[in-house]
Amino acid sequence: MNTKKTNYSFIGIAFIVLVFGIIFIPKIVDRITGDDVTRTESRSQNVSTKTEGFVSDLMFLEINGAPKKVPQFSFVNQNGKTITNKDYEGKVYVVEFFFTTCPTICPRMNRNLVQIQNTFSEFEDFGVASFTINPDYDTQDILKAYADNYGITNPNWHLMTGDKDVIFDLANVGFNIYAGENPNVEGGFEHSGNFALIDKNGFIRSRKDNFGNPKIFYKGIISEEEKQDDDGETEEISLLKEDIAKLLKED
């Protein structure tokens, strides 16, 4: 065995490794600390954690091909303050139509809304818009007492009163939520027990039904605890909570 030849081979290999380190390692370091590698890694991180520009899978309610936006409104709330649709800009909120002397569905609706209020109590950009359909009776003081009785504490939850015809038009045309007077029913008024969900930009949003169409509204009468009513209708408060959370993540 030629020991001298073997030693030369080791020396040659060591020389090649040294040259590789001198030439290529600084270039690798440059790439890591410079543009290439860090830029690629930051792209992957942004995909998984960044919420800027996030849009959820909730659908828009489209009328004649255009997404439907909340119409302009202006009413007085339980604290005597004039509230308009602009006060809700930048907020996710739930819309209901009710009246304080309602003997049937309104108490259940508002207990469910209070539960939703408490679920999102830490979010300053969440609110509720409650419009009375009996404004002749539901004055500011009546609405204030009602809010206190139900534990309504969210500063963005406005119980509003105003001109009856304007409120009915807002319900039936603006939100497509039925409301009307009927002396033959208990309480003298009839209305839908549904809630509408509005995003931060004032658009009506909802999830898809089994056919891929927007559900439009959420059932507001059945509580999460009940699961179903006597007719077999399933509660949708849990769905509404899930969708509120999605919209709160949107810009």
Image (spheres, rainbow, N blue to C red):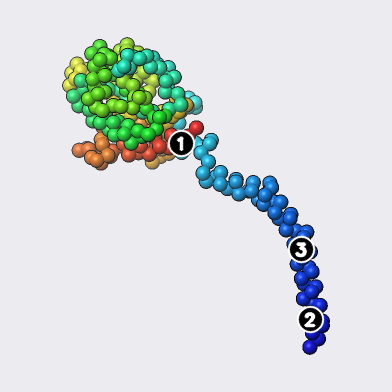
Q: Quadrant of the N terminus?
A: bottom right
Left-right relation of 170 to 139: right
Residue 243 in which image quadrant = top left
Asked whether residue 168 is in view, the answer is no
In the image, is residue 110 above or below residue 17? above
In the image, is residue 65 above or below residue 170? below
Q: Earlier in the sequence, mark 1 or mark 2?
A: 2
Element under disc 1? helix
Q: Earlier in the sequence, mark 1 or mark 3?
A: 3
Nearest the eye: 214 or 19? 19
Q: Report the residue at 52% width, 46% height from top.
A: 48
Q: Earlier in the sequence, mark 2 or mark 3?
A: 2
Provide the residue designation for mark 3: 20
User: Which x, y percent locates residue 23?
Assistant: 78, 59
What whole-number distance in Å separates the C-alpha atoms at marks 1 and 3?
50 Å
Q: Amino acid at mark 2?
A: Thr
Left-right relation of 36 to 156: right
The disc placed on residue 249 is 1
User: Which x, y percent locates residue 177?
Assistant: 33, 24
Element under disc 3? helix
What whole-number distance in Å separates the C-alpha atoms at marks 1 and 2?
67 Å
Q: Amino acid at mark 3?
A: Phe
Q: Report the residue at 26% width, 19% height from top.
A: 144
In the image, is residue 246 above or below residue 176? below
Asked whether residue 59 is in view, the answer is yes
Residue 124 in which image quadrant = top left
Provide the residue designation for mark 2: 6
Residue 60 in which image quadrant = top left
The disc placed on residue 36 is none
**Label 2 close to label 3 by CB (< 8 Å):** no
Q: Amino acid at mark 1?
A: Lys
Q: Report the residue at 23% width, 40% height from top.
A: 226
